[in-house]
Image: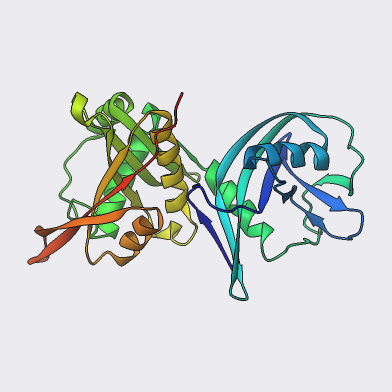
Amino acid sequence: MKINIHEMIKRPLKYVVIAAMYKDEWLMVKHRDRTTYEIPGGHIETGETPLQAAERELYEETGALSFELIAVGDYSVERDDACNYGRLFYAKIDEMGPLPESEIIDVKTIQPEFKWTYEKIQPILLQYVKNHLAIREIELRDDQELYDLFHHLDQETKFMMYEKNERQTTVEQVRHRIEMIQKTGVMYVVDDNELGGFIMMNRGSCNRIRHVGYIVIGMKMSLAGQKFGTLLFNRIFNYAKLNHLHRLELTVMTHNLSGVSLYKKMGFQIEGIKKDAMLIDGEYIDEYHMSKLIEVESE
């Protein structure tokens, strides 16, 4: 069995799963025919949007009356040569009412002794949501941590622009960079007690390229395999749609196989090769120029 998280696009979706939090505690529900607990969710009914299905399931299975729902991404469950897709949501519940009459007979906060109904699936989905919540927009107060992150990445990987100890920027210059990106685009960071990764997008400054966003992403190796790359791109895509950007661009060294794989997964296509674009350890390195066109949501 393989579980994965994806960009939210038009695709056949069968389910919604809602990781719901109330008073800073995660909720689980118990079906009347089971002894196990599970995260709220269910089938998308005919004629429903994923959001409508999530709203209905959350109320029916928890009694939630007032809440905020945020789509985290599309997830897939692949097994026995079959692959089903659903949409994963995060819910912050403000008010709970009586539990409606349904197949759900109990709602509790997660306890270590609980047995999961879908123990190979839902714990992974819950972790995706927790990782989603670790992502936020950059703030001016992050200047020192962002400075440290840049220098850490310079030391850890050869896939970024700067060589070890080459970067000469100061904390004050990093702060100015944050101020500029807040005016010309957006930057999201992974804040897991300390900054562990970022994705930054600058918007074209002239009218003829205002629909274009230029992306740079960097991540500590310690966060590899936790789907933060996918989750960061989902934040960027949502920002792009809300702000009417149509074309997104990035470059990547051709031998950065994990980077190329991620970008292709997120819908980027190779448009061309920049020959001898970088000089690393005395060798010229090619770069792919990649782009993605997205639908701009109407107002």
The answer to whether residue 285 is above or below residue 211 is below
The residue lying furthest to the front in this view is 47
Count the marks: how many? 0
**x and y percentages locating residue 128 in the rendered image:** 57, 52
The answer to whether residue 227 is above or below residue 205 is below
Colour mapping used in the image: rainbow
Q: Looking at the rendering, which quadrant does residue 169 occupy?
A: top left
The answer to whether residue 93 is above or below residue 259 is above
Is residue 104 left or right of 276 when viewed as pictured? Answer: right
**x and y percentages locating residue 29 in the rendered image:** 82, 49
From this viewpoint, is residue 97 visible? Answer: yes
Q: Nearer the viewer, residue 219 or 49?
A: 49
**x and y percentages locating residue 68 in the rendered image:** 65, 31
**x and y percentages locating residue 209 in the rendered image:** 21, 31
Residue that appears at 36% across and 29% down: 244
Residue that appears at 25% across and 27% down: 176
Is residue 147 left or right of 296 when viewed as pictured? Answer: left
Residue that appears at 52% across and 43% down: 134
From this viewpoint, is residue 194 visible? Answer: no
The answer to whether residue 191 is above or below residue 84 is above
The residue lying furthest to the bottom in this view is 80
Is residue 58 left or right of 277 when viewed as pictured? Answer: right
Q: Nearer the viewer, residue 51 or 177?
A: 51
Q: Looking at the rendering, which quadrant does residue 85 occupy?
A: bottom right
Question: In which quadrant of the rendered image does the N terminus lie?
Answer: bottom right
Residue that appears at 70% across and 47% down: 44
